[in-house]
Amino acid sequence: MSQERRSLRLAVRELAFEPEADAVLVGFHLPRGGFATAVLRELIEAAADSDLA
């Protein structure tokens, strides 16, 4: 099985947040080959590093 190179940047489209009582619903669209878990990790780290946490 051959491995393909992935882009260092990922175009996240239609990013949306919906706060709930004890959670936040997050929605977005990714191009083929994008990993949602990587996007969520970056969002969580960015929030932890800002005043949003």
Image (cartoon, rainbow, N blue to C red):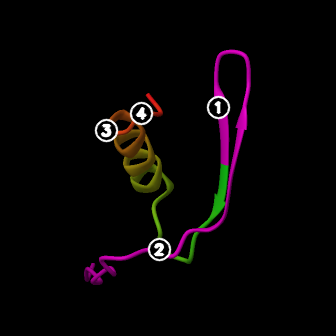
Identified by mark 2, the residue type is Gly
Horizontal and vertical percent position of residue 36: 50, 55
Contact between marks 2 and 4 (CB within 8 A): the answer is no
Does the segment drawn in magenta span residue 9?
yes
The dot on residue 49 is: 3
Identified by mark 3, the residue type is Asp
Looking at the rendered image, the disc whose residue lies closer to the viewer, 1 or 3, is: 3
| Inter-mark Cα distance, 4 to 3 | 7 Å
| Inter-mark Cα distance, 1 to 2 | 25 Å
Looking at the rendered image, the disc whose residue lies closer to the viewer, 2 or 4, is: 4
| Inter-mark Cα distance, 1 to 3 | 18 Å
Horizontal and vertical percent position of residue 7: 33, 81
Contact between marks 1 and 3 (CB within 8 A): the answer is no
The dot on residue 51 is: 4
Q: How many marks?
A: 4
Q: Upstream in the sequence, badge 2 or badge 4?
A: 2
- Residue count near mark 3 (Cα–Cα under 10 Å), binned few <14, some 14–19, many ≥20: few
Tell me the residue at 58%/69% (across/down): 30
Extreme-front residue of the structure: 51
Identified by mark 4, the residue type is Asp
Compared across the picture, whether 31 is left or right of 39 comes to right
Horizontal and vertical percent position of residue 19: 71, 31
- Magenta segment, principal secondary structure? loop
The dot on residue 24 is: 1
Residue carrying label 2: 33
Q: Which residues are magenta?
A: 1-26
- Residue count near mark 1 (Cα–Cα under 10 Å), binned few <14, some 14–19, many ≥20: few
User: Based on the displayed image, in which of its 4 quarters is residue 20 positioned?
Assistant: top right
